[in-house]
Image: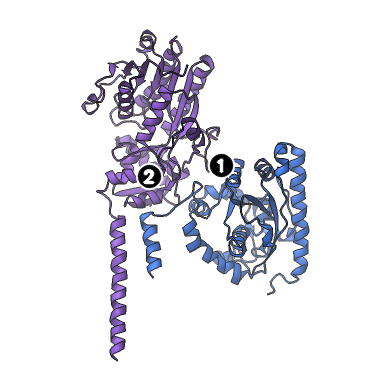
Amino acid sequence: MARGLAFLRRRLTGGYEVDEFGFDRELNDAVFQPLLRVLHHDWFRTEVFGIENVPPKGGALVVANHSGTLALDALMLGVAIRDQHPEERHLRLLGADLVFRMPVVSELARKSGATVACNPDAERLMSTGELVGVFPEGFKGIGKRFADRYKLQRFGRGGFVSAALRTGTPIVPVAIVGAEEIYPILADVKPLARLLGVPYFPVTPTFPWLGPLGLVPLPSKWLIQFCPPIPTEHLTDLADDPMVVYNLADQVRETIQATLLELLEKRPDAFGL
Amino acid sequence: MTSPPSVVVVTGVSRYLGARVAARLAADSRVDRVVGLDPHEPPTALRELLADVELIRADARAASGAIADLGAEAVVHLAVTSAPDAQHGRAAMKEQNVIGTMQLLAAAQAAPRLRKLVVRSSTAAYGASFRDPGVFTEDTEPRAVPRGSFARDILDIEGYVRGFRRRRPEVAATVLRFAPFISSTADTTLTRYFAQPVVPTVLGRDARLQFVHVDDALEILHRSIVEEHAGTFNVAGAGILSLSQAIRRAGRISVPLPEGTLSTLAGVARNVGIGQIGFDQIDLFVHGRVVDTTRLEREFGFTPRTTAEAFDDFIKGHANGSSLTADRLAAAEKAILDGIRRVRAGAAAGGDRH
């Protein structure tokens, strides 16, 4: 009770710390994480493998596959690291500018530690020793149809690789299985998407038919596998070499794709326990 | 080359910042002559401050001869206003900011003995876009032309300085991009905004803000005149406050309004002449603005007090008008906890008896 009141007083008087990107550690630990943990543990029954591949300290770039219509996989990845890592590290996500265009959403994203996916911010976070999370597939990944599940999309221009190279930050590839089934996209109504200014307008078995109820994710079984880090200190001078950048991006992509297939074999039933 | 200039011309001395800079230069024994240039008569409150400053009542155009005739070695351009005043409006503001700068720099360019140029700019130079990085370094280019009139003026002013640097490369030109000024006594659009008991904000947005304490800004200005620090520098207090946090710390109450409503209100308010909030402020409150001050601290060997410390000083000077103060909330918290303790003690005593 006393702790709760002290928390409330700190919140009401502004007596808390926010970092330069807007990350509110206290709010995150007291409000966001406990809520997300319910989804992570009880709803998706997430199992995490290879957490020892996330460095105990210093900058690292976590690169994962992206899926699930709404970017819940990014949030679950954050919970996995915060809960399972011995140092309880925070994951600083890089989000599309669309996220920061939307009122309310943009501020929730900033307070939870995210920032706009751009090289200056990524490099600044990594060089100050933060753990940065990025999803190079972007909207191509989360907006793909259910029929294309677990097929990695294009990795863009590999900007994430050059940011890692420039700061000599290790890259940790991650495969996430489970997010593809939470809102299976059966069709994408493109004209409606264009009208609303969003990258896609999903039609799932429950959305938009059930209205807000269609926003409840299906309770699929999730597996998250962290792969061994790829060191980059020796490549710092080659950050602008497109061939090096492309090859490294491709290596990360191949690793994630192969790991996805392995994980899928471990999980014969998408909605099993 | 790095010796302090003997003759310094300061523009904008009819306003607080200009007057303080000129007064401090006049008090510095290394500087022989300080000339204040301003088309307006300084108000009586600043008159005393300017006792040792020679005043020339002229605008930049008329001053073009004066700068060369005086043998000015340094020009400090502070006649840059961040908001239109109720009397003269936006046209006068643009005249002063843009045309004034253009003419002053033309005059400075023709001054043979000039060695230093110091120009007041603003972090508004980075514009406001949703694709902006979270933290601006001096090399960040604005992604779009901002809609705020002050921000647009700042882009023009910096454009003129770029031209000046090309034409007089041997003059050490310093551009200082200041975060909004704050202190216990500073009177700006933003301090007036935070001083209101009820503060309008943008619904669904919680901007990251930075401030610089006026005294630290003066220190940086003084050093850039008497020392030599060519280049462009962000001047801000390290760290940030979110808008909601700043309002809570000041003990004010925020009223979130949709951005459209706020823009309309700002338009109406400006037409009526009570321009408390303009597009400059709305953009700031939607996008926030945070800058990196590494270059400043390395070059000047000086660290301004943090944004939180600078804002604390503002709160001290504006205690009245706050409703939800830290003291009151702490007292309320103590009262609740004491109450619970009493009830518990009472219950325990009652339990013993039975």
> Color of chain A here?
blue
Residue situated in front as seen by the camera: B326 or B188? B326
Residue situated in front as seen by the camera: B230 or A226? B230
Numbered circle sitting on residue A122 = none
Separation of marks 1 and 2 at Cα, in angstroms: 30 Å
| Chain on which label 2 sits | B
Instruction: Find residue B233 and report its horizontal and vertical position in percent.
Output: 48, 31
Quarter occupied by the C terminus of chain B: bottom left
- Give the quadrant of residue B77: top left
Q: Residue at x 61, y 43 (%)?
A: A123
Q: Residue at x 54, y 17 (%)?
A: B166
Residue at numbered disc 2? B309
Q: Examine the rendered structure and indicate whether residue A142 appears above or below residue A128.
A: below
Q: Residue furthest bottom?
A: B354
Q: Determine whether, in the image, residue A62 is placed left or right of residue B152.
A: right
Instruction: Find residue A209 and report its horizontal and vertical position in percent.
Output: 59, 65
Q: Determine whether, in the image, residue A103 is placed left or right of residue B17.
A: right
Tell which chain the image draws in purple.
Answer: B
Residue at numbered disc 1? B131
Residue B288 shows in the view:
yes
Instruction: Find residue B201 and report its horizontal and vertical position in percent.
Output: 38, 48
Task: Name the residue type under label 1.
Answer: Arg
| Chain on which label 1 sits | B
Q: Examine the rendered structure and indicate whether residue B84 appears above or below residue A24.
A: above
Residue A185 shows in the view:
no
Looking at the rendered structure, the secondary structure element under dot 1 is: loop
